[in-house]
Image (cartoon, rainbow, N blue to C red):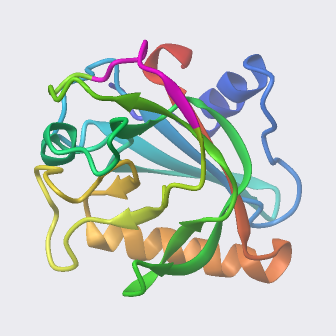
């Protein structure tokens, strides 16, 4: 999958009827792009951040996963199945906080829709039952010390960045954005085919 740019992301969101924040400095658009390759355990998705500063558009695209690793697919925490975030726009989904009480991250504060994939294999089942609620679907990093190659236990449904440096950069942008716009953030998950 080719890394999308600001204009491509803006067009994709507007085409789907989603809001794209294009006014003011550091009004962040946090956008997950799920790869058409639905196999598990690799950081084959992207998390993009698009914003303007002094009227100039900026966009960073990070390697990430938008779906859980093989461990949690084979060993669901929830009896109904592993949580896989349903594509869509989730206004005010995340706020600045602590991931599992350990380090600064974006933590869930509003309800989301998840597929409950319960067949314990490595493929996303988008025909699985959908559940709504607060499930701890956060945005955080994998390893604190190196770029992770495999998702493994890093995600049980969270949106996870592979590289700790990328995650630090994302958090710095969110902290800066919070000064202008408050500490809550909308998240939009789209699929590769939407671009």
Residue 106 locus on image (x, y percent): 54, 69
Q: With 158 as the anchor, is 90 left or right in this view?
A: right
Q: Nearer the viewer, residue 47 or 118?
A: 118
Residue 75 locus on image (x, y percent): 16, 45
Q: Which residues are magenta?
A: 124-131
Which of the image's four quarters has the N terminus? Answer: top left
Answer above or below: position of 62 versus 179. above
Q: Nearer the viewer, residue 92 or 115?
A: 115
Instruction: Find the residue positioned furthest to the bottom.
Output: 102
User: Residue drawn 47% across and 22% down?
Assistant: 129
User: Residue drawn 70% across and 61% down?
Assistant: 185
Residue 93 locus on image (x, y percent): 67, 56
Q: With 189 as the anchor, is 7 left or right in this view?
A: right
| Any part of residue 58 in sight | no
User: Residue drawn 81% across and 65% down?
Assistant: 54
Instruction: Find the residue positioned furthest to the front.
Output: 79
Q: Does the segment drawn in magenta span residue 61? A: no
Q: With 186 as the anchor, is 85 left or right in this view?
A: left
Which of the image's four quarters has the C terminus? Answer: top right
| Any part of residue 131 in sight | yes
Quarter holding residue 45: top left
């Amino acid at each position: 999958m080719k890394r999308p740019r600001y204009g491509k992301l803006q067009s994709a969101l507007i085409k789907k009827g989603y809001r794209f924040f294009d006014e003011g400095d550091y009004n962040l658009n946090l956008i997950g792009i799920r790869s058409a390759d639905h196999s598990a355990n690799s950081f084959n998705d992207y998390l993009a951040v698009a914003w303007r500063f002094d009227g100039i558009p900026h966009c960073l695209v990070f390697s990430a996963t938008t779906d859980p690793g093989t461990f949690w697919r084979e060993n669901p925490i929830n009896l109904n199945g592993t949580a896989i975030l349903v594509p869509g726009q989730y206004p005010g989904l995340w706020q600045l906080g602590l991931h599992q009480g350990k380090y600064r991250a974006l933590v869930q504060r509003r309800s989301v829709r998840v597929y409950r994939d319960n067949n314990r294999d490595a493929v996303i089942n988008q025909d699985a039952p959908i559940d709504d609620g607060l499930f701890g679907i956060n945005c955080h990093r994998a390893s604190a010390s190196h770029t992770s190659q495999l998702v493994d236990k890093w995600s049980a449904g969270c949106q996870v960045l592979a590289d700790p440096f990328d995650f630090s950069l994302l958090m710095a942008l969110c902290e800066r954005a919070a000064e202008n716009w408050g500490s809550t953030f909308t998240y939009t998950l789209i699929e590769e085919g939407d671009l």
